[in-house]
Structures are given as C-alpha cells and as structure tokens.
Image (cartoon, helix red, strand yellow):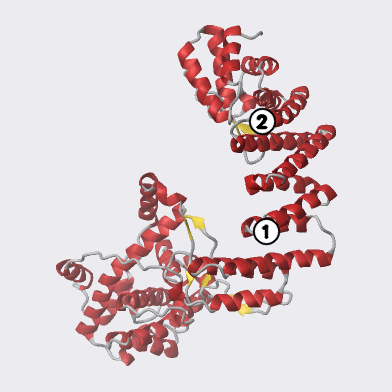
Amino acid sequence: MGVDPTVLAGIAEVSVEFASLQELLQRWIARVNAEAWQGQAAAEADALWAALCFHVTERGGLAGDFIGHDADRWPANPQAVSDSAVETWADYAEAVGHPMLRARLHHLVWEARKRFPHARKAIEDYTEAVPRFLGMADRSAGRCRASDCLCFAYDLAVRLSVRDLELITKQTMIGFVRELFDAPQEAAPGLVLEILRKLVGRNASDAAVQALLSRATSIHSGDIAVLVELLQLRIAGTQDPQERTALQRQIVESLLTEAERFPGFVRLDRLNAAAIAARDYGLEDLFDEARVRMQAIDPDQLGMGSFHFEFPLRRDEIEDYSQKVLGQARTLGQAFSALASLPAPSGTRQAAQEHARRLASEGLLSSFVPSIRINAAGPVPVAEARVRTAADDENEWHVTAMMLTSVYVHHLLETVGDRFDPTAAQLAQLFTADPIITGTRAVKLALAFRYYWSGEYDAALAIALPRIEGILRETLRYRRIPILQPPQGDSRGRVTLLTTLIDRVTDAGMHADWQAFLRLLLVDSDGGLNLRNSELHDLSDTETAPQTVALVLLAALHVTAHAHQAAAPASGIGEEQQRG
C-alpha cells in the first residue's frame, strides 16, 4: 500500500521526542490541521491520529476513542478497524523512527489482526524505547514513560507466552528499579510499585525480585502506604510460615504506629485498617490492641460537623392536610384506617429515580467525592469509603421525604389523640387480631400510643419498635410464609429477624413503597434511619424527636392493618378499612 512521504515526514518531525502519547497526539492534531492533506494522504494521517487515540484497558487490551472526520465513527475495538487502516499501521510501524511509536503501531496490528510477528516487534520496540525515555531532559516524565513501555512489553510477553522476550523484559525491569534505588533524591515509589506488582504477579518467589522488595522496603520505610504494599508483595513470595507471620505483624504494627501521628478521623481510619489486617492475618493480640485504641477515641474528637436543614412548612397547609385525611373519620377505627391507608411516607421509587437522574446531570462533582459512614458509638467506620451511587441519591430522597412527611404524620396523630382520647383498653381492643396480634401484643402497642400522646416519646419508641417486628413475623407465619431458619452445621436454628421479614412482606401483599419505607426507617444502616438498631441497641445519644416516633407509630398502624386483613376479624382497623 505504501507510505505517503509528506505524511511520514510530518509524523517523523513531531515524534522526535515526546513525553507521552497524549502530547504526541496534540502535536499531530495541530500538524494535520495545518497541512490539510487530501485523498490517500488524509486517510493515512487519520489512521495515525486514530492510533494515538487508543488506550490500554484494565484487561490489557486496547480501546480507541477517535471520532473521525466522516459520517461513520471509527470503531473503538481495533478488531473492527478496516483492513486498509490496519495496513497503514503496519507500513508506518516499519517506517517511523521513534521506538515507542513503532511499538504502538505494531501493538495495534497485533490486537487488530493477531499477526504474531507484529506482537514480537511491539515487545522489542517497547523495550528499545526505555533508554530513549531515560535520556530525556525531563527526567520525571522520561521515567514514567519508560515504566509504561516496560509494563506494556511485559504484559504482552506474558499474555503471548513469548518466554525469551519475557526474560529480557524482566531483566530490564529489574535493572530499571535498581537505577531508581541508586538515585534516592529522585525516589519514585509509584513507579517502583508499578514494576514490582508486575514482577511479583509472575515471579513472586524469584530471588532477584525478593531482593528488590527487601531493598525497597528499607528505602521506603517512612511511607507507610508504600511500605504496607511492599510487605504484602513480599508475603506473596514467601513460603516460610514464620517469615510470613513476621511480615504480617510488621504491617499491622506499622499501621498502629502511623495512627499515633494523627488526630481525629485519620487516626480512626488508620486504626481501622490495622484492625482489619490483624483480623485477616489471625493476629489476635494486635486485633485487640487496635480495637482498644479505636474505642478510646472520643467521637467529639473526630472532627465531624453536623449539617442542619430547615424546611419551612405553613401551619394552614398542615391543617388542610389533616382535614383532608381525617375529615370523614367519625370513629377511632376510621381515623386509624385513614392513617394506615396513607401513601408510604418515603415516596415512590419513580420519584426517587427521577431525583437521582437529575443529580447525575447537574451535580457531577458529588459523584467523585468518596464518603464513609461511621457508627459514633464505637467509634468505627461501618462501610468502606466510596463515591456516591444513584442508589445513594435515591435513598437520600426517600429519607428527606420521610422527614418532611413526619411533620404531617405527627400532627395527624396529635389530632386523633385530641379528638378521641382513647384509653389503653380501647386501643388494645381495636388492635387485637387473633391469632396474629394477641391481646398481650395489642396491650403493649396500645401503651406505646398512650405514651406518645402523653409526651413520653422515648417510652413510646422503645415499646413500639419490637411490636412491629412481632406483628410482621406473625403475619408472615399466618400467611404460610417461612419465618424459621433450621440449624445448619455449627449454626443454631433461629427465627428470621426483621431485615429478612421486611424482605418478604410483599409476598404477604404489602405495597413495595411501604416495604421500602419500613426498610429505611428500621433496618437500613447505609442510608436510612436504622431505628431498630440505633434505638434498641442504644447507639444514638440524640434527643428523640416526636416526628420520628410518629413515623414508627404510623408503621405500626400499617402493619396492624395488614394483620387485620389477613386474619379477617369481625371488628377493628381491618373492618374499618374495608368499609372505607
């Protein structure tokens, strides 16, 4: 097919020396726009442009993002590139001067058409480019590109089982790391780790590789993050149990020592990492030491702040809503039926998804900021730090909807209490739905409502929360939905707990929106209120808000109404709801 001399001269001029393929791409774009080649020359220039737009994927392949100048976009998969473009890459790979550019073109031809000679040439040219980059005036950029070339060459050689070139590349990598060690004033732990990860993955027990790891551990002992990873790489290559344990102890002790350098959350984070490592390594003494240090931290020392948001609600709006819900209620049963029939306070999933999509389009920055949840009663992180997802945004919308609705629910319940002022006996009779809600359970639930109306919110919350779990469990039992976990192996048999019960409530006819509300309100520790755990395990030291208790009592009314529907009682909430 041949090579256009003007295009070859252009690419040769801009590629004499470059610090990265991205830099070379920018130069080539400027050159192509300035030359305005036509016909075959333009096609060859575009093929080179596309070649520079390919990048290495996580799996080691190449993927492109060149748009092209015609109506049809260039394919991202090199195997879908036209034969003429692949031939252009092959021709220019033999003609251009810079070894990394040659390597990239040979690499692309291999990925596109699996021509083995081009794979060998790519490995050879990547290796040849190393001294060229190390001789650059910009030593930092040169070392980075040299590392890239070595990793490209080694990955290709390993993937293709080209043993001779793999050994050559391995020796070059070892020499490269030794040169980095010999220039401590230019320490580059990131490059050292990048090369050593590759070598350990293939040669974990190799004496030369272990020697590099040992020397690297000594040189970078002051950088705990680097030191820990180096020690982990050394562990991967040792078969001696005593040496392995010694290295594991060194990792945990290093994390414990580093933790002492920091206050607040950073100290907690380091101690948490030490505890996890000690647990995974089976080092019980260090595991206990890390945990004792964590729990000695005062939550007030973590440096966390509270955010408060105010949502203005008009009194007349609340009154209008109350009249709309309870205006037709002539009896206590009708009032409770109206409350139990309300839409789920957490809103619909469709609305939450729309909110998440809007945030994704408008709040791009938030999706890149990692966050973490902490149980301050420990204090201890309860999840790994991660960026927000659409599910997180949906949960946040649901919880916000719950908190807004709680104001209205609180007013509705206060209105019911003022209007009917029922006794505990009257409430118990209304709640009873044998055999699901027995008299004893109904009396306890009645006490929760009486405590609420008398302003004893903590007592109301403590009594109502277990009743919800009991009513759900007995409703599922009555519906012939399994609620037992028989013994298995060393584990004992048990009754299914609340989280699993909530997962099954839709099988008993509950609406999915109410299921989501119960999960967020009672057991969701990732984004919900998690009241069952935070309150009954005394993990919260904040004052109990009446609006929160109102949500719990509303949940109790809803599951009670379902129990009545299942048991088909002669009277009570179920009958009132059916009449409504």
Mark 2 belongs to which amino acid? Gly
Residue hosting label 1: 221
Mark 1 belongs to which amino acid? Ser
Indicate the quadrant where residue 480 lies.
Answer: bottom right
Visible residue check, residue 255? yes
Q: Is residue 363 above or below residue 60?
A: below
Q: Tell me which numbered mark, 2 or 1, is placed earlier along the sequence.
A: 2
Q: Quadrant of the C terminus?
A: bottom left
**Viewer-side residue, 546 vs 439:** 546
Q: Residues within 10 Å of mark 1 (few under 14, many from 20)?
A: some
For the point 55% across and 15% down, the residue is 45
Indicate the quadrant where residue 571 lies.
Answer: bottom left
Report x, y in % for residue 241: 83, 65
Residue hosting label 2: 135
For the point 73% across and 40% down, the residue is 176
Q: How many marks?
A: 2
Report x, y in % for residue 81: 61, 22
Q: Residues within 10 Å of mark 2 (few under 14, many from 20)?
A: few
**Viewer-side residue, 18 vs 237:** 18
Report x, y in % for residue 412: 24, 75
Taking 252 as reference, is 442 left or right? left
Q: Is residue 578 above or below residue 152?
A: below
Q: Is residue 96 above or below residue 350?
A: above
Visible residue check, residue 72? no
For the point 22% across and 76% down, the residue is 329
Report x, y in % for residue 203: 81, 47
User: Mark 1: which secondary structure?
Assistant: loop
